[in-house]
Image (cartoon, grey):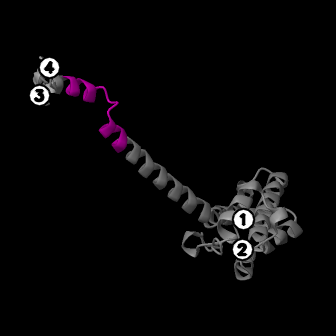
């Protein structure tokens, strides 16, 4: 015979000052559901952006490295051609960083190229590194998986296997041999 409305204690209003103040204190703690969703969405957007930038960086790695190594190849070629071993200079010229016409132009250049390196040992070491770099690039583009470095294996799986062969060079990044 007793009903819930006659139980004696009235039900508090959802708009009572006590309940509102408790909710405000709870929201200020920073562990509320509303804030967690926004924070999670922000992290997700940041993660997606980072992944896209990393993928583009892996895709554009060769043109950037090619441009840098091309500048080094010019220096190495000039030094070795004028002060070192011509066979080693020809190997640098033939590795793919320089075009045949550019090699002929470099052969005609005169200057004080001895300032580029402290002896032929350092220049030959640099030449070997440049040739090794271009061998790795060719291995990636010729689908020789066993000859790839771990980074190039990742790039092979991400890009070459899916049909997105990364470019080797972007001419607008490359330094000119006539400078």
Q: Residues within 10 Å of mark 1 (few under 14, many from 20)?
A: many
- Residue that extends furthest to the front in the rendered view of this protein: 1
**For numbered disc 1, what is the local secondary structure?**
helix
Quarter of the figure that contains the N terminus: top left
**Relative to residue 37, is residue 123 depicted above or below?**
below
Q: Is residue 74 left or right of residue 31?
A: right
Residue at the spot x=72%, y=65% of the render?
73
Number of the front mark, 4 or 3: 4
Tags 4 and 3 in contact by the CB under 8 Å rule? no
Q: What is the number of the mark on residue 13?
A: 3
**For numbered disc 4, what is the local secondary structure?**
loop
Q: What is the number of the mark on residue 73?
A: 1
Residue at the spot x=62%, y=74% of the render?
178
Front position in the image: 8 or 121: 8
The residue beneath circle 2 is: 98
Number of the front mark, 4 or 2: 4
Q: Residues within 10 Å of mark 2 (few under 14, many from 20)?
A: some
CA–CA distance in space, label 4 to label 3: 16 Å
Quarter of the figure that contains the C terminus: bottom right
| Image spot of residue 43 (x, y percent) | 43, 45
Front position in the image: 32 or 141: 32
* Region in magenta: 22-38
Q: Is residue 10 left or right of residue 160?
A: left
CA–CA distance in space, label 3 to label 1: 80 Å
Q: Residues within 10 Å of mark 3 (few under 14, many from 20)?
A: few
- Which is nearer the N-term, disc 1 or disc 2? 1
| Image spot of residue 132 (x, y percent) | 80, 61
The residue beneath circle 4 is: 7
Front position in the image: 56 or 103: 56
């Amino acid at each position: 015979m007793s009903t819930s409305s006659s139980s004696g204690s009235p039900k508090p209003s959802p708009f009572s000052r006590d309940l509102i103040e408790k909710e405000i204190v709870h929201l200020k703690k920073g562990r509320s559901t509303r804030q967690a969703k926004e924070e999670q969405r922000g992290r997700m957007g940041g993660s997606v952006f980072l992944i896209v930038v990393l993928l583009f960086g892996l895709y554009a790695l060769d043109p950037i490295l090619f441009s840098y190594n091309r500048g080094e190849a010019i220096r190495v070629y000039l030094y070795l051609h004028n002060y070192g071993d011509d066979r080693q200079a020809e190997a640098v010229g033939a590795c793919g960083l320089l075009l045949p016409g550019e090699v002929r132009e470099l052969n005609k250049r005169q200057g004080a190229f001895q300032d580029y390196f402290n002896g032929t040992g350092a220049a030959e070491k640099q030449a070997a590194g440049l040739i090794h770099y271009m061998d790795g690039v060719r291995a990636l583009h010729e689908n020789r998986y066993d000859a790839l470095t771990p980074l190039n294996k990742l790039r092979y799986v991400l890009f070459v296997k899916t049909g997105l062969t990364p470019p080797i060079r972007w001419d607008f990044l490359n330094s000119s041999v006539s400078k």
